[in-house]
Amino acid sequence: MCGIVAGIAQRNVVPILIEGLKRLEYRGYDSAGLAVVNQGEIFRKRELGKVKGLEALIASDPIAGNVGIAHTRWATHGKPSTQNAHPHVSKDKVAVVHNGIIENHDHLRTVLQQDGYVFTSETDTEVIVHKIAQELQSTDDLLAAVKSTIATLQGAYALGVVHADQPDVLIACRKGSPLVIGIGIGEYFIASDIAALLPVTQRFIFLEDGDMAELTINGASIQDEHGKRVVRPVIESQLKADSVDKGKYRHYMLKEIYEQAWAVSETLEGRFVNNKLQDTAFGHNAAEVFDQIKSVLILACGTSYHSGLVARYWLEKYARVPCSIEVASEFRYRNPVISPDTLVVTISQSGETADTLAALQEAKKLGVKHSLVICNVPESSLVRESDLVMMTRAGPEIGVASTKAFTTQLVALQMLLIAVGRRFELSREMEDNIVSELFGLPGNIEKVLKLDETIEVLSQRFADKHNALFLGRGTHYPIAMEGALKLKEISYIHAEAYPAGELKHGPLALIDAEMPVVTVAPNNNLLEKLKSNIQEVSARGGQLIVFMDEELAESSDENVQIIKMPSVANIISPIIYTIPLQLLSYHVAVLKGTDVDQPRNLAKSVTVE
Ligand code: AGP
């Protein structure tokens, strides 16, 4: 949800900021802008659309400066337009980039307008820059002006602020939206995500909520929410600049689909001793926490919610661990009843999803004592706010459509099944079985990826379709949901998932030759039931595409196309059956010519409500 990058250096920061914006574009790509301070003036360029448009604009009419701020936008207040693009400027002197939402912007706008400030955009952000300008009437200290401004703001923000007359300082602050400081040699940067700064540094300070920082070429001075000077730890990132390159792949999404075997191995690495999962994989005090809990509550959004849905089946079926799950945006406002000995598990690729973070905070307010996050981004807000942490080590996921994060979340959730389940009714035999299947998983992923070409051909059947249904049962119903989400997200085909048993309660009315019905049919105890559901669709002229175990005798007919899948154990089949659905949505999107990695209206990291 908007990306910001800014820097102060002894060299021209414009190329660094442009490169940073490209690396942040997954956060929003409606418009982009950049402003630098040079010889007492602010020079600003803004362009509707993607960063490459801004880059071309600057190439045709260059600007340069040693201090600058830049932004790529995901519109919340005000349509995507050049006028609404950041940076916003007041009195030609102050410029601001903002990620987040200012909830009391209406009130602040009215007051500032009464004081003579003229607004040129529809954004909530513009109140911030005018307010800073107003505060500067009574002080020359930019930090102090920003400080008194943020005291008036309600909502979430990460800010970068520069002033035309103060070319030697860059101000940064955050509350509710992420912001890191990148430490170079005699130069300092800020960004919404370290990925933006990897070409210039691997050393980072993660600002905490409420922190403000004053950056000069000589250092970063940080104060906490109480105005107390603080020293935050410097973290060396292991990521390299090229970790976020597309490599030989046409899209990040395809690269990330193909990285799944590797990502799963990474997620398993070092968490077992003599094939026995260590409780410490979840944190040094995990054993103590797991010993106390009586149930599990999972909170997440989107794809992460789907992985939680699978985990609920696992925890209850194999270990009799009472488990409930809720979409985070509903949980946070529902005032639910929750017992203190529940383990609240949040699942999030980014660790910054505003609803999931708020749901965790709400659960704590309601008295929950123990929390665990399954997350892909170290130092993210959810990681910092949770007692226990299980990192998925999928590497940066850039494609807006989540793929490798999902499969590694499922792997992490299997480890949770073992760790919590062994304290309930998970048998030793089942535990050993899960471990052995997990170790074999990367090989099985490689096998299923070999279906890529078959699925590419299959994707042609969707090219002229406007709707699709996805069916599954048991642990594979959430996989059908994930398949439908992937398809709608990147190909813009309306897709819905149903537990196959629900068909005759309504959706069967939709079936005709124009409605592809994708069915996930592994060889498990529900297969015979599912076959009946397949017959119900076929008998009504529905066109089925069925992903089915290679050992089953069924073959394709006029209405039913069967794609044979490698035969795998039930416990890992949800992970395996996810992959062809990812490939299917990818190839359909490519055929339809959509922007696969940056689909319309979406952003990777949903840091606003
Ligand atoms: C998945 O393809 C989506 N882009 C989206 O549903 C995502 O999973 C959701 O926004 C949650 O994000 P998180 O995992 O970073 O919390």
Image (cartoon, rainbow, N blue to C red):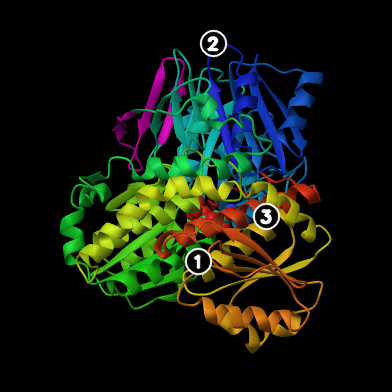
Place of residue 484 in the rendered image (x, y in percent of width and height, measured from the top left): 64, 64
Mark positioned earlier in the residue sequence (1 or 3): 1
For numbered disc 3, what is the local secondary structure?
helix
Disc 1 designates what residue?
A: 329
For numbered disc 1, what is the local secondary structure?
helix
Q: Say if residue 329 shows up in the picture.
A: yes
Query: Pointers 1 and 3 in contact (CB under 8 A)?
Result: no
Give the residues in magenta: 212-234
Q: Residues within 10 Å of mark 2 (few under 14, many from 20)?
A: few
245, above or below 478, in the image: above
> Which label number is shown at residue 10?
2
129, above or below 457, in the image: above
Q: Say if residue 403 shows up in the picture.
A: no
Magenta run includes residue 264: no
Type of amino acid under label 1: Ser
- Residue extending farthest to the top is 10
Q: Residues within 10 Å of mark 1 (few under 14, many from 20)?
A: some
Disc 3 designates what residue?
A: 585
- Residue extending farthest to the bottom is 505
